[in-house]
Image: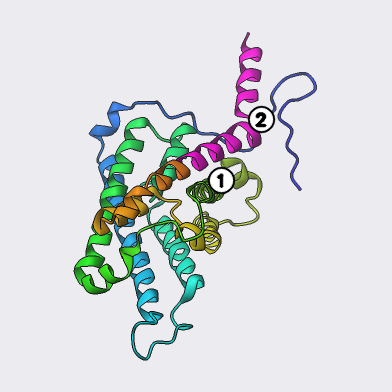
């Protein structure tokens, strides 16, 4: 166990064994003049494109392999829900690993939104990341439709919809909780305090993040097909363009954004006690 003492008996703050980066400015126009900013946008676009391409192909492939209306089909064959969950979690692990050093490896507007609320990214970067992610998702699903149009149209295009027997309220709750798990894991895996004090235990941040996506998919595929990523849901809805998908689409934006906001608040203001530290710093300067 590690010893975590924030304030000494004399009221002074001891030297920390980790470094908290300063809050990012709300709007940083200088970012527009840097190639690294545009490189990050390209990385988010390509990563989300690849994510949607592989995962939607997996979903459609599973449905075609288990379609009872086709001859000589084993209804117990295919990758199953477990394989679909592995496809989503595995791709997040791979893509976060590949892009973390370039863009931070968000690949998800909900993750970007949570990091924005925690002052980890500027408003400008957050908005343009979300745009890049949504465009990448549309292109990724578009490639699936271009290569396998008949299977794509027959098996729903990987669009998120509510399963029969579940209300929209249940779906919204599932998306809130699922996204909370994901974004909370992102904050915890990238926390500078954890990295400093648990340096003897090497933690590869993409691994717990990908595993969180895997576990959430196992739990919520039977309910909503698992969104927890507005870009993923948006790209599939745009290309498949069904009335049911659009009628329920708000769930896959509102739920993830609420879940991300709760995770950001919980990690920053409860676990890391950001508000208390700021108040203590203010009093020490007074």
Q: Determine whether, in the image, residue 231 is placed left or right of residue 12.
A: left
Q: As displayed, is residue 133 above or below residue 219? A: above
The spot of residue 182 in percent (x, y) is 52, 50
Determine the secondary structure under disc 1: helix
What residue occupies the far top of the structure in this picture? 286
Q: Quadrant of residue 8?
A: top right
Query: Can residue 44 be seen?
Result: yes
Report which residue position mark 2 lands on.
Answer: 15
The stretch in magenta equals 257-286
Report which residue position mark 1 lands on.
Answer: 184
Q: Determine whether, in the image, residue 7 is placed left or right of residue 155.
A: right
The spot of residue 191 in percent (x, y) is 56, 43
> Is mark 1 in CB contact (under 8 Å) with mark 2?
no
Q: As displayed, is residue 226 above or below residue 127? A: below
Determine the secondary structure under disc 2: loop
Residue at horizontal 34%, vertical 54%? 245
State how the image is colored.
rainbow
Most foreground residue, 251 or 29: 251
Residue at horizontal 56%, vertical 34%? 265
Which SS does the magenta portion mostly show?
Answer: helix
């Amino acid at each position: 166990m590690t010893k975590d003492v924030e304030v000494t008996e004399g009221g002074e703050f001891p030297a920390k064994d980790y470094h908290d980066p300063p809050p990012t400015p709300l709007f940083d126009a200088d970012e527009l003049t840097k190639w690294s900013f545009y490189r990050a946008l390209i990385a988010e676009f390509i990563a989300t494109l690849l994510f949607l391409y592989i995962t939607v192909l997996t979903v459609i492939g599973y449905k075609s392999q288990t379609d009872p209306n086709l001859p000589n089909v084993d209804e117990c064959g295919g990758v199953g829900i477990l394989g679909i969950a592995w496809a989503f979690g595995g791709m997040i692990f791979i893509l976060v690993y590949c892009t973390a050093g370039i863009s931070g490896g968000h690949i998800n507007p909900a993750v970007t939104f949570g990091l924005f609320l925690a002052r980890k990214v500027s408003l400008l970067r957050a908005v343009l990341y979300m745009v890049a992610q949504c465009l990448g998702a549309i292109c990724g699903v578009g490639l699936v439709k271009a290569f396998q149009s008949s299977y794509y149209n027959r098996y729903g295009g990987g669009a998120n919809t509510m399963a029969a027997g579940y209300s929209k309220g249940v779906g919204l709750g599932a998306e809130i909780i699922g996204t909370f798990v994901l974004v909370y894991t992102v904050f915890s895996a990238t926390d500078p305090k954890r990295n400093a004090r648990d340096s003897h235990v090497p933690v590869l941040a993409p691994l717990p993040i990908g595993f969180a996506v895997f576990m959430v998919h196992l739990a919520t595929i039977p309910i909503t097909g698992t969104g927890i990523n507005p870009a993923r849901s948006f790209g599939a809805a745009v290309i498949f363009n069904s009335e049911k998908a659009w009628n329920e689409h708000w769930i896959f934006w509102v739920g993830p954004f609420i879940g991300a906001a709760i995770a950001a608040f919980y990690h920053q203001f409860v676990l890391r006690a950001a508000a208390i530290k700021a108040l203590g710093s203010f009093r020490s300067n007074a």
